[in-house]
Image: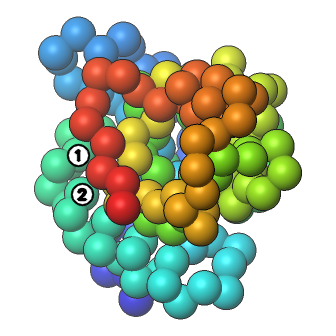
Amino acid sequence: MLDAALAPPVFDDAAVAAPALTGSKVSAVTLLDTSVSGDNLGDQIIMDAVWRELDGLFDDRLMYTVNSHDPMGPQSHRVLGRSDFAIAGGTNLLSSRMWFRKTWQVSPLDIPTMGRKVVLMGVGWYQYQGRPDPYSGWLIKSLLNPGYLHSVR
């Protein structure tokens, strides 16, 4: 069960647009929540751990959450567009065949708001597949932030 103090605020359209990362405060961070709309208890356990690890790191920032297992809608795109980066927590989001077997419901249409913003935290690779096909490699590279370390399992 998530601690109420760790729960993200309700999204408000009046929120300030996030500035570029320049070493100053980041005004918004989005958590791609892998436990929403799912029946996998493991995803909930991992997301609880992600919230515990993030506790206190973003006290001066807006924290939003969006569902990672459903396609992004307009509201999710607005939140991500205002965030300086997004943290994807847990589960096997990555796949060698992102066009075919994708837990993470992303597409090229998501790149304008998510592109190069995603930081992975405890994310796995579906069935430990081999090298990604060209589309999957391009999509993953287009989404991940090259400026941060990624935690994968």
In the image, what residue type sits under mark 2?
A: Leu
Q: Is residue 45 above or below residue 88?
A: below
Q: Is residue 82 above or below residue 120?
A: above
Q: Depth check: 63 or 85 in front?
A: 85
The nearer-to-camera label among 1 and 2 is 2
Q: Residue at x 74, y 47 (%)?
A: 97
Image spot of residue 6 (x, y percent): 31, 67
Residue at coordinates 25% horizontally, 36% vertically from top-left? 149
Q: Amino acid at mark 1?
A: Phe
- Furthest residue in direction front, as rendered: 130
Q: Position of residue 60 (x, y in %)?
A: 21, 40
Residue visible at 78% across and 57% down in the picture:
101
The residue positioned 23% from the left and 70% from the top of the image is 52
Residue 135 figure quarter: top right
Which mark, residue 58?
A: 1
Residue where numbered disc 2 is placed: 54
